[in-house]
Amino acid sequence: MNASSVSLIPSRERGWRMGLANMLAKENVAWWRTRRWWVQCLIALFFLNFFMALNLSIGGLSNAVNSFLFIAGVVAPVAAIIMGQDTIQGERLSGTAAWVLSKPIQRPAFILAKLIAHGVGLLATWVVLPGVVAILECTVLFKVHLPVPGFAGALGLAYLNLLFYLTLALMLATLFQGRGPVLGIPLFVVWGFMITPLGVLLADVMPWRLLNDLGRNGAIPGLGGHLLQGVPLLTVSPIIATVLWCVLFTGVAIWRTSREEF
């Protein structure tokens, strides 16, 4: 089925929500009635669970969990970035965006529908499914104990990390016409913590510390590791900062879309 082929119904919403339900239905079709969802599931299972199983077999639980969190922090965001930029720029280049926005739909609803649909899709394919499979891997296949409450908390941080890059890519797609900066800037941000001075300097205002250790020899421990160990978090600044970044990116995307002629 074509992702754009969805039966539209008369919109009875008013204000900024006008057209939100119809647009959300269209975006959900693109996720759940095409091959996108199972392709994302396969990619997520390969990167997160296959390598976790490999580390469980040769390096033990600690190395396996560290591998899972590292990949969730630096590989999973690539999927969010690609989807975030393509959902705006792909429709702009194909003319779909101009057609959709000629209908009774408000610009905020246009952005929010994409954010909600992609946010739910990424939650299901890159967080919930790999998380459940990881627990089964540990308990059933390798007979090791994975602290479920702490792991669930770490998965929450992984999802917040994904939302950061999804909203960043959405915002950049509304600001730039070309794909270069829309892909290049977020990818630089994903791996920016590997530049040690930069990672240390921005540890509390970027999402890097949510899942990864920063600094030389992991001098600044990641929050996900603390949750897995059952240790109280030393700081919540990266969590608060990431939430604020997501709100800011979404607000800028809505503001820019409201002023652009498609």
Image (cartoon, grey):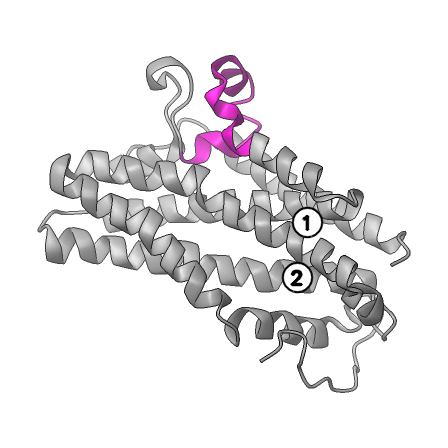
Q: Which mark is residue 114?
A: 2
Q: Nearer the viewer, residue 45 or 217?
A: 45
Q: Nearer the viewer, residue 223 or 109?
A: 109
Relative horizontal placement of residue 146, taking residue 33 as reference (left or right): left
Under mark 2, the amino acid is: Lys
Q: Is residue 59 shown above or below 219?
A: below
Dot 2: element: helix
Report whether residue 230 is seen. no
Which residue is depicted at the point 61% across and 37% down?
186
Under mark 1, the amino acid is: Leu
Q: In the rendering, at what x and y percent does residue 56 appear?
A: 16, 42
Dot 1: element: helix
Q: Is residue 205 magenta?
A: yes
**CB atoms of marks 1 and 2 within 8 Å:** yes
Which residue is depicted at the point 58% across and 46% down?
81
Q: In the rendering, at what x and y percent does residue 99 appear?
A: 83, 71
Q: Is residue 222 magenta?
A: no
Range covered by the magenta-colored residues: 189-211
How far, Cα to Cα, is label 1 from label 2? 9 Å
Which residue is depicted at the point 69% across and 86% down?
7
Label 2 Cα crowd, 10 Å radius (few <14 / some 14-19 / many 20+):
many
Q: Quadrant of the N terminus?
A: bottom right
Residue at label 1?
170
**Quadrant in which residue 216 is drawn:** top left
**Quadrant in which residue 107 is drawn:** bottom right
